[in-house]
Amino acid sequence: MEAPVYICPATVADAGIISRILERSIRVGCALDHRNDPQLVDRWVRRQSAEQISAWLADPHLYLNIALLHDKPVGVGMAAANGEVTFCHVQPEWFRRGAGRALMGDLEGWLRIRGRPCVTLASTRTGEAFYRRLGYREAASPSTHDGVLTLPMHKPLALSA
C-alpha cells in the first residue's frame, strides 16, 4: 500500500523547493506541451523563480500548497481567490500516486470555503486527462498561451451547507 499523501500550505521558506519542483515538472513532465523547444521551456521556467513564488506567497488572494509523500515534497499547486487553479504540478517520478488528486482536492476546498461556486483552469495537453478524471469539463475552445496549447476547463463546486 502506498504511503498517504500529506498536503500543507506553502510558506516563504518553501519558495526554493517549489521552484525546483515546478522546473522539473515543466522540463520533464510537460515535454508534450513544450516539445523540448529550449526558448519556450526557458520562458515557462523563468516565470517560476523563487522570487516570483515568494511574491505569490505574499499575496493574500493566492493559495499555494505542497504535497508530501514519504516526507518528500513531490508536488505543488496554486489557486486564486477568483476561482482559478493556476497550476498543479507533480514531479514525473511521482505521477499516479495520488499527489495531484490530493493537491487539487485541497485547492478546491480552499475555493469552496471562499464561496466559489466553480473552479476554472487552463489545462495543457499533458494535464487534460487528469483533470477530466477529477470532473473538469471543457469550457471553451483550446487556445495558445505563450506558445503552449491550453484548454479552458471548469468544474462546479458543491458548497458546504
Image (cartoon, rainbow, N blue to C red):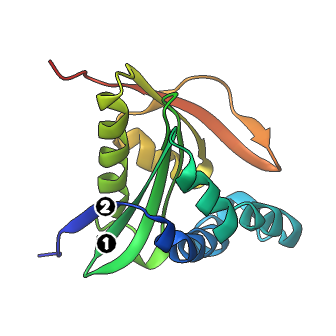
Residue 25 % position (x, y):
57, 70
Crowd tier of the residue under label 1, counting other residues whose Cα lies within 10 Å: few below 14, some 14–19, many 20 or above: many
Left or right for 83, reference 46: left
Left or right for 161, reference 96: left
Q: Is residue 135 above or below residue 41?
A: above
Badge 1 amino acid: Leu
* One can see residue 99 in this view: yes
Crowd tier of the residue under label 2, counting other residues whose Cα lies within 10 Å: few below 14, some 14–19, many 20 or above: some
Badge 2 amino acid: Cys
**Which of label 1 and label 2 is nearer to you?**
2
Please tell me in which quadrant of the rendered image residue 158 appears.
top left
Task: Looking at this view, name the residue that lies furthest to the left.
Answer: 1
Picture residue at 24% right of the left edge, 65% below the top: 6
Residue 146 % position (x, y):
82, 48
For label 1, the residue is 68
Left or right for 88, reference 114: right
Q: Provide the secondary structure element on which disc 2 rests.
A: strand
For label 2, the residue is 8
Residue 78 % position (x, y):
49, 50
Picture residue at 50% right of the left edge, 42% below the top: 60
Please tell me in which quadrant of the rendered image residue 121 appears.
top right
Please tell me in which quadrant of the rendered image residue 95 appears.
bottom left
Q: Is residue 23 above or below residue 104?
A: below
Picture residue at 31% right of the left edge, 72% below the top: 68
